[in-house]
Amino acid sequence: MTGRILDGKATAQAVREDVAARVARLVEAGVQPGLTVVLVGEDPASQVYVRNKDRAATAAGFRVDTLRLPADTPQADLLAHVERLNADDAVHGILVQLPLPGGLDADQVVRALDPRKDVDGLHPENVAALVTGSEGLVPCTPAGCIEVLDRHDIPLEGRHVVVVGRSMLVGKPLAQLALARNATVTICHSRTTDLADHCRRADVLVAAVGRAKLVQGDWVREGATVLDVGINRGDDGKLVGDVDLEAARERAAWITPVPGGIGPMTIAMLLANTATAAARQAGVSEGEEAAARR
């Protein structure tokens, strides 16, 4: 068996096209969805991420602003900027690019966001909504994982999902999303004993720990679906995932590559979250929002 590639680039493009249609519908209704990205400091990776987000959001029809602040911005000043954006009705989504420079409290900044505008889905109210099944905004990378599965007709109901990683960004929210789809979920982490054995029991295996090629080919159950969320630099400088791709393909039915797998989905789902936030804040009904997707 050679696992088929789940093409994140193509899937993300389809999502972005759907979002563009939703944005056009909102604009017709007199709502110009607005996204503001807050970038503190000059971290090279963050600069690239923000530039890509700006381009994608602009292409989808959003009004996009980037607030660039120096690395030595005091915490109080950063919080004041967040409060100003919270109060601005033209801003429907706020994304504070993480990680923040040393000396800044990211948790406090996230808690200061209006949860309705928290398009990263990290505010405690959005976390609680995910756990309770209430209306909220879902973290982008886990939402992207589910979207990839949905668009390739890979079901979760009744299946065993093993998530390797327990971060608030990916592991924990993805487990909640899988539970909501009636999957049986196991969360593993750095202190899990017999990690390979747990992985071999997975119908759907998600690797999200940030360790290059941690998941070996023989850790993958025959016919499993493998989602590789990790992004690491190999010894040769090239990007590699948390899964040994070529070895895992010998056993998996479906697998995401790195790069070109889950990564592009993160930005696509950020756009989807922003469109949803704009619709909700403008009082657009779910029926109208759904019509924009057709």
Image (cartoon, rainbow, N blue to C red):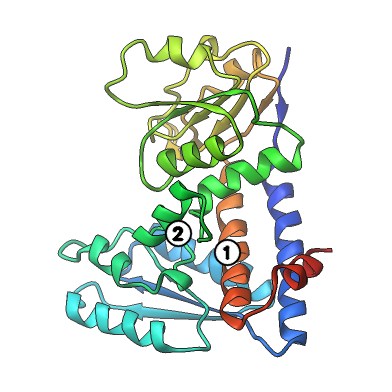
Residue at label 1?
A: 273
Q: Give the x, y percent position of residue 22.
A: 74, 71
Distance, label 2 to label 1, CA atoms, is 9 Å
What x and y, as percent, mark residue 217?
54, 14
Relative image position of residue 219 (x, y in whole percent): 50, 12
Q: Residues within 10 Å of mark 2 (few under 14, many from 20)?
A: many
Q: Residue at x 76, y 37 (%)?
A: 152
- The residue lying toward the viewer, choosing from 13 and 122, is 122
Quarter of image, res 194 = top left
Task: Please tell me whether mark 1 sits on a helix, a strand or a loop.
Answer: helix
Where does the image place residue 1, in percent across and percent down from the top left? Answer: 73, 12
Residue 224 appears in the rendering = yes
The kind of secondary structure element at disc 2 is: loop
Which residue: 65% across, 29% down?
157
Lower position in the chain sequence, tag 2 or tag 1 = 2
Q: Residue at x 30, y 25 (%)?
A: 190
* Left or right: 38, with 268 as reference point: left
What residue is disc 2 on? 121
Task: Residue type at mark 2: give it.
Answer: Gly
- Relative to 200, is 165 above or below? below
Q: Which residue corresponds to the image point at 76% horizontal and 62% vertical from the top-left?
A: 18
In the displayed orientation, state which residue is furthest to the right.
294
Query: Taking 113 as reference, is 84 above or below it?
Result: below
Q: Quadrant of residue 222?
A: top right
Please state which amino acid type lies under the numbered disc 1. Answer: Asn
Q: Quadrant of residue 181?
A: top right
Contact, CB < 8 Å: mark 2 with mark 1?
Answer: yes
